[in-house]
Image (spheres, rainbow, N blue to C red):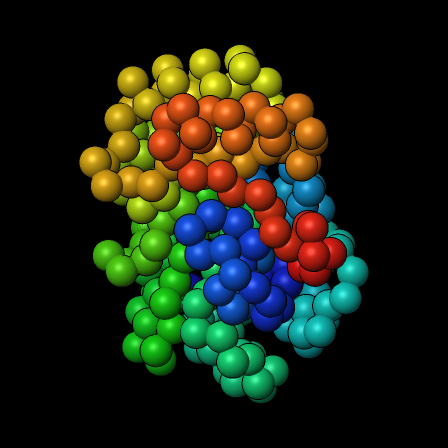
Amino acid sequence: MQYPLNEVFETIQGEGVYTGVPAIFVRLQGCPVGCPWCDTQHTWDLDPEQQVAPSGIIGKLTASATWAEFSASQLLALFKAQNYHAKHVVITGGEPAMFDLRPLAAELESAGYRLQIETSGTFELRVSPQTWVTVSPKLDMPGGYLVRPDCMKRANEIKYPVAMQKHIDAFDHLLKTCPPRADAIIALQPISQRPRATELAIKTCIERNWRLSVQLHKYLNIE
């Protein structure tokens, strides 16, 4: 199994339950969902003309649409070659659920890594039972994809981006029509750290006893 890798880097997780945890981010190329506020729009198109050799991804310093194919074993070798210390691996994108992540999970978990996937919940999840699934539901996006009930049931945490009350209302409808598992952690994340969005998220989290996710990495100005 080959995966279209846009970039890989070591940092701390800045969102959700694992905020503050050292992590290796594996960003895959390709996403048809089309969120207007997406801060990684360069990962949307899986353009063959942007494919480069694996060496072109290592140490990538600027955001771009270039990508390279990596197998699970090549990715594990890259972790070791880069002398990464973190044992928490975040598979993100793009939309990583477009790909079968089970071979990648088997390779990395056998080497002592813990996996987390960040997904919109619009594609079937092909992950290991141990993978921590973060579903960030994307509703009424230009791509026209629907959030899958099976993704909501599999999610360990549901991290929902909000800016206005209509987003809360839409989320309430989703929770009613696609109920999550009983132990799923629900977090609200203000879009782009806008003051009004942050105020709304804090107010709602207090009222509902939900969590707040604030994209810590953007406040710290790190990846």
What residue is rendered at 40% in x and 24% in y?
A: 207
Left or right of 6, for residue 85:
left
Task: Quarter of the image for the N terminus: give it.
Answer: bottom left
Left or right side of 214 for 108: left
Q: Is residue 180 above or below residue 61?
A: above
Quarter of the figure that contains the C terminus: bottom right
Q: Give the image quarter of residue 149.
A: top left
Left or right relative to 89: residue 111: left
Observer able to see residue 105: yes
> Height in image: 90 above or below 112?
above
Give coordinates of residue 4: x percent, y percent: 56, 58
Seen as rendered, the residue at the extreme right is: 62
Frontmost residue, 200 versus 136: 200
- Residue at the image point whose x is 70% and y is 65% from the top: 52
Residue at 36% across, 49% down = 133
The quarter holding residue 12 reads: bottom right
Seen from the viewer's position, the closer of residues 182 and 57 is 182
Left or right of residue 72, residue 26 in this image: right
The image position of residue 196, as x and y in percent, is 66, 24
> Quick check: 93 above or below 109?
above
Q: Total marks drawn?
A: 0
Q: Extreme left residue here?
A: 182
Foreground: 28 or 206?
Answer: 206
What's the residue at 53%, 28% (across, down)? 201
Res 51 seen here: no
Q: Residue 14, image x and y in percent?
A: 56, 54
Tell me: residue 157, above or below residue 91: above
